[in-house]
Amino acid sequence: MSFLFGSRSSKTFKPKKNIPEGSHQYELLKHAEATLGSGNLRMAVMLPDGEDLNEWVAVNTVDFFNQINMLYGTITDFCTEDSCPLMSAGPKYEYHWADGTNIKKPIKCSAPKYIDYLMTWVQDQLDDETLFPSKIGVPFPKNFMSVAKTILKRLFRVYAHIYHQHFDSVIQLQEEAHLNTSFKHFIFFVQEFNLIDRKELAPLQELIEKLTSKDR
């Protein structure tokens, strides 16, 4: 969760998405942070008793966006058009961008361009009150879970790119503990609610097994 980062790095790639204080979602976020503080990530991701699954997924999706935003913000100097002319996660996996509205046919682009497209697109979804309602009593749309799955699938690609192409920089910046904790939390969450297909996780499968094997 965001508190893992303290105030060490205030640089984010995109503006942070805030959950309004005093709202039920804010209370859920505080609950999640308190549970995370116990160090048991498997338990921290579980749906709290009596809570709505859509709301829990929404709060956590916003939080993962903020975490990845911060993590990518720390290495933007190393992720350039020259260093990363393609959006890849190791030699076997390359991603082409399409959002279905502005860009319908997948395009090849550099990693910084792809991640800019991706984070802007995610931000637009999170800011859409019809998709992510922040007011009490406003229902989530029927397609909410499929939108959330697409967001999380795309956010995973930023983790995959950082691990494969920029892990040396992460070590140099002494951010690897933050990255590993954030990614482990992300993986436990998507596994708990079956939010990303296994084949999509393939670029980091070995790492996932290593990070999660101790907690089975």
Image (tube, rainbow, N blue to C red):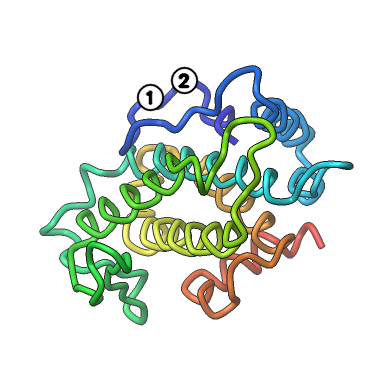
- Give the x, y percent position of residue 54: 68, 50
Element assignment for label 1: loop
Categorize mark 1 by other alpha carbons within 10 Å: few (<14), some (14-19), many (20+). Answer: few
Q: Quadrant of the C terminus?
A: bottom right
Q: Are marks 1 and 2 in contact (CB under 8 Å)?
A: yes
Q: Which mark is residue 107?
A: none
The span from disc 1 to disc 2 (Cα, nearest Å) is 6 Å
In percent of the image, x 52 and y 23: which residue is there?
Answer: 6
Left or right for 190, reference 34 = left
Left or right for 141, reference 158 = right
- Give the x, y percent position of residue 208: 61, 65
> Extreme left residue here?
82
Amino acid type at mark 2: Ser
- Give the x, y percent position of residue 145: 61, 60
User: In the depicted view, which residue is nearer to us: 212 or 129?
Assistant: 129
Q: Quadrant of the N terminus?
A: top right
Left or right for 126, reference 76 = right
In percent of the image, x 22 and y 54: which residue is there?
Answer: 112
Q: Which mark is residue 7?
A: 2
Amino acid type at mark 1: Ser
In percent of the image, x 51 and y 75: which residue is there?
Answer: 200
Which residue, given by chain and number where applicable, does mark 1 sit on? 10
User: In the depicted view, which residue is nearer to us: 158 or 131?
Assistant: 131
- Give the x, y percent position of residue 51: 81, 42
Left or right for 67, reference 50 = left
Whether 171 is drawn above or below 91: the answer is: above
Res 19 → quadrant = top right
User: In the depicted view, which residue is nearer to us: 98 or 81?
Assistant: 98
> Extreme right residue here?
49
Res 177 → quadrant = top right
**Number of numbered discs on residues:** 2
Element assignment for label 2: loop
